[in-house]
Image (cartoon, rainbow, N blue to C red):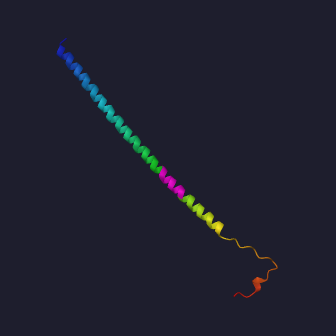
């Protein structure tokens, strides 16, 4: 066997290993970036949902405050003749 062929085979194997390393590094880097993008999109959707729920809570609290503030009129007694008096 020619020693030059052995050296060429070893160099080809090293080059192939380096190419495989960089290919996997690029693939895993792309997968990581895609994963981060998916997490960000999910977080943004959760933030939108939280904003909508906050608006519902504020509207509910305002409605409850209005109910508490509005005084319910007390019914008149049956012996009260004020309804027959002239309005001034």
Question: In the rendered view, does 12 fall on the left or right side of 66?
Answer: left
Along the viewing direction, whichever of 5 and 88 lies nearer the viewer: 88
| Residue 74 position (above or below residue 36) | below
Magenta part, dominant SS: helix
Q: Quadrant of the N terminus?
A: top left
Q: Determine whether, in the image, residue 3 is placed left or right of residue 74.
A: left
> Left or right: where does residue 77 sit relative to residue 60?
right
User: Image quarter for residue 11?
Assistant: top left
Give the residue displayed 20% in from the left and 20% down from the top.
Answer: 8
Magenta region: which residues?
Answer: 46-54
Asked whether, in this view, residue 10 is left or right of residue 27, the answer is left
Could you say where residue 66 lies in the image, as x and y percent from the top left?
A: 62, 67
Tell which residue pokes out farthest to the top in this image.
1
Let me know if residue 50 is in the magenta part. Answer: yes
| Residue 47, magenta (yes or no) | yes
Identified at 21% across, 16% down, the residue is 6
* Quarter of the picture holding the C terminus: bottom right
**Residue with the most extreme right position:** 79
Q: Relative to residue 25, is residue 69 depicted above or below?
A: below
Residue 10, x across and y down, in percent: 23, 19
| Number of numbered labels in the structure image | 0
Q: Please state the horizontal and vertical placement of residue 59, each as a whole percent of the image.
A: 57, 62
- Residue 28's quadrant in the figure? top left
The percent coordinates of residue 45 (x first, y second) are 47, 50
Look at 46% across and 47% down and name the residue there.
Answer: 43
């Amino acid at each position: 066997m020619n020693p030059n062929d052995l050296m060429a085979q070893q160099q080809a194997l090293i080059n192939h290993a380096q190419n495989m390393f960089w290919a996997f590094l690029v693939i895993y880097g792309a997968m990581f970036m895609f994963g981060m993008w998916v997490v960000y999109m999910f977080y943004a959707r959760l933030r939108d949902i939280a904003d909508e729920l906050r608006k519902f809570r504020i509207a509910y609290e305002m409605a409850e405050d209005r109910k508490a503030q509005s005084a319910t009129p007390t019914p008149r007694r049956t012996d009260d003749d004020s309804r027959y008096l002239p309005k001034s």
